[in-house]
């Protein structure tokens, strides 16, 4: 420790003039700073429902490794749940993170799932796309592909509708359900359900908040669950898009049993036991593989 720094610490804490006392002072303040960071992380979780390591690292001016340690300590205390690239609140039965937060999490997994999902669309199809960020990423990839030629999309997702509206080509038609807006920027409720019931689609692509074996697929919002069920009722085929982390989540409202779903597309991060049990319950399980480029990008971005 330099004489200048020693002098500063002595002024800040005159009663701790010994080197041992100064070291204890430094350690106390490191612990205080750590506790403040963790308090802020929990505060962000309460307002947003989820946080991302890269965003916290930038906001707090510390390394991603430091944020990971803070999140690990909070997870050990049961105060949050760790997910790939960040953390989510443990109070997820009745609430869900904002769309803007969720869209920045597990990006590589969603890209891999979307690449598999677009194989289930043919030019000229009439499809439905539900709410949530995984369905949104699917829509992004679909609209960039040749399969989107001449398709019609029914959606209750405002972000998906905006994607189609922003297209330079008007070869894709979009029908928006209307309804009440949720935290995930989805339109739900009786108005949405009535519009959906008047139509018919080849395939519906839905996300899910959690996967429960052997129950099925669940959402925290009962109105959103009801609208998802309405979409399934008008579809010839139902496909659920979800990453492997959803098998460790829980939620309130069941919108589909396994035997009501034709295909589940997830990533190859799903543990073998859950994969085997799911395969026994659903008609088709597809495990999308993350490319090395995607995996490296995820690690780079926290």
Image (cartoon, rainbow, N blue to C red):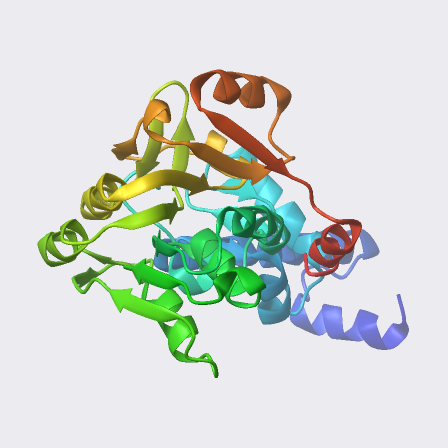
66 or 213, which lies in front? Answer: 213
Give the left or right position of residue 229, taking residue 149 as reference.
left
48 or 280, which lies in front? Answer: 280
Position in image of residue 87 (x %, y %): 52, 48
Quadrant including the C terminus: bottom right
Residue shown at the point (39%, 65%) measured from the top left:
160
Can the viewer see residue 130? yes
Position in image of residue 208 (x %, y %): 39, 42
Most extreme residue toward the right, as rendered? 2
Residue shown at the point (25%, 46%) measured from the top left:
231
Residue shown at the point (36%, 39%) measured from the top left:
237
Can the viewer see residue 220? no
Give the left or right position of residue 42, taking residue 91 as reference.
right
182 or 125, which lies in front? Answer: 125
Position in image of residue 36 (x %, y %): 53, 58
Residue shown at the point (48%, 34%) measured from the top left:
264
Q: Does 1 sit above or below residue 3? A: above
* Quarter residue 217 falls in: top left
Most extreme residue toward the bottom, as rendered? 168
Give the left or right position of residue 76, taking residue 255 as reference.
right
* Quarter residue 54 falls in: bottom right
Quadrant including the N terminus: bottom right
242 or 64, which lies in front? Answer: 242
Position in image of residue 155 (x %, y %): 30, 60
Image label count: 0
């Amino acid at each position: 420790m330099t004489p200048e720094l020693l002098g500063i610490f002595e002024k800040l804490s005159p009663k701790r003039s010994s080197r041992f006392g100064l070291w204890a002072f430094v350690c106390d303040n490191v612990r205080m700073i750590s506790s403040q960071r963790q308090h802020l992380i929990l505060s962000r979780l309460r307002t947003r429902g989820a946080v991302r390591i890269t965003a916290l690292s930038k906001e707090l001016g510390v390394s991603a490794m430091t944020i990971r340690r803070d999140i690990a300590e909070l997870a050990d205390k049961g105060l949050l749940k760790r997910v790939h690239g960040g953390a989510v609140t443990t109070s997820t039965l009745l609430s869900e993170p904002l769309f803007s937060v969720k869209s920045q999490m597990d990006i590589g997994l969603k890209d891999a799932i979307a690449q598999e999902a677009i194989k289930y669309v043919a030019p000229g199809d009439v499809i439905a796309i539900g709410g949530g960020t995984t369905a949104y990423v699917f829509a992004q990839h679909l609209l960039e592909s040749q399969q989107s030629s001449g398709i019609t999309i029914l959606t209750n997702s405002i972000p998906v509708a905006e994607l189609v509206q922003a297209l330079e080509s008007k070869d894709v038609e979009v029908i928006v359900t209307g309804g009440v807006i949720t935290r995930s920027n989805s339109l739900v409720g009786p108005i949405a359900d009535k519009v959906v019931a008047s139509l018919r689609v080849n395939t519906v692509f839905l996300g899910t908040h959690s996967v429960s074996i052997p129950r099925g697929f669940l959402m925290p919002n009962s109105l959103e669950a009801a609208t998802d069920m309405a979409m399934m009722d008008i579809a010839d085929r139902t496909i659920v898009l979800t990453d492997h982390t959803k098998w460790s989540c829980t939620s309130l409202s069941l919108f589909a049993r396994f035997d009501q779903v034709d295909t589940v597309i997830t990533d190859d991060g799903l543990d073998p036991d859950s994969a085997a049990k799911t395969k026994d319950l659903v008609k088709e399980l597809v495990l999308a593989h993350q490319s090395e480029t995607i995996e490296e990008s995820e690690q780079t971005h926290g």
